[in-house]
Amino acid sequence: MTSETANYDEPWKEALSEYFEAFLCFFFPEVHQLIDWTKIPESLEKELKRITASAKTKKRFADKLYKVWLLSG
């Protein structure tokens, strides 16, 4: 008997990508206020994969990495 593992992670990743600004506004309003939202956040997913691939531990907690610009420069 084979069982399929439910993929709960991907929908959350997709939602976070789509609603990144709203996510930060709701969960981290202090951080949201510091970001210059006239500049589009840059996804650094490939860079994150390179970093985690070379990590000594196989445990991963971060799935998303974004570059943002601050209002302070």
Image (cartoon, helix red, strand yellow):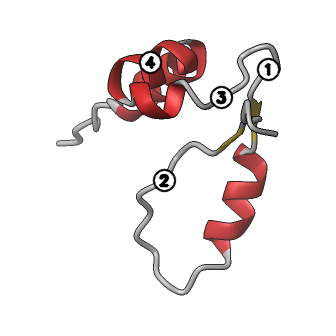
Of 68 and 2, the residue lying toward us: 68
Mark 4 or 3 closer to N-term?
Answer: 4
Quarter of the figure that contains the N terminus: top left
> What is the number of the mark on residue 25?
4
User: Circle 1 sits in a helix, a strand or a loop, which is it?
Assistant: loop
Where's residue 30, x and y in %? 43, 31
Q: Residue type at mark 4: give it.
A: Cys
Residue 53 in the image: above or below residue 12: below
Q: Quadrant of residue 3?
A: top left
Q: CA distance from mark 4 to mark 3?
A: 10 Å
Q: Residue at x 73, y 24 (%)?
A: 36
Mark 4 or 1 closer to N-term?
Answer: 4
User: Circle 2 sits in a helix, a strand or a loop, which is it?
Assistant: loop
Mark 3 or 1 closer to N-term?
Answer: 3
Q: Residue type at mark 3: give it.
A: Ile
Q: CA distance from mark 3 to mark 2?
A: 20 Å
- Contact between marks 4 and 3 (CB within 8 A): the answer is no
Q: Residue at x 28, y 38 (%)?
A: 5
Q: Residue type at mark 2: give it.
A: Ala
* Residue located beneath label 1 in the image: 40
* Residue located beneath label 3 in the image: 35
Where's residue 25, x and y in %? 44, 18
Q: CA distance from mark 4 to mark 1?
A: 15 Å
Mark 3 or 2 closer to N-term?
Answer: 3
* Residue located beneath label 2 in the image: 62
User: Circle 4 sits in a helix, a strand or a loop, which is it?
Assistant: helix
Q: Between label 1 and label 2, give the one nearer the viewer.
A: 1
Q: Between label 3 and label 1, give the one nearer the viewer.
A: 3
Left or right of 37 on screen, residue 29: left
Mark 2 or 4 closer to N-term?
Answer: 4
Q: Residue at x 58, y 13 (%)?
A: 18
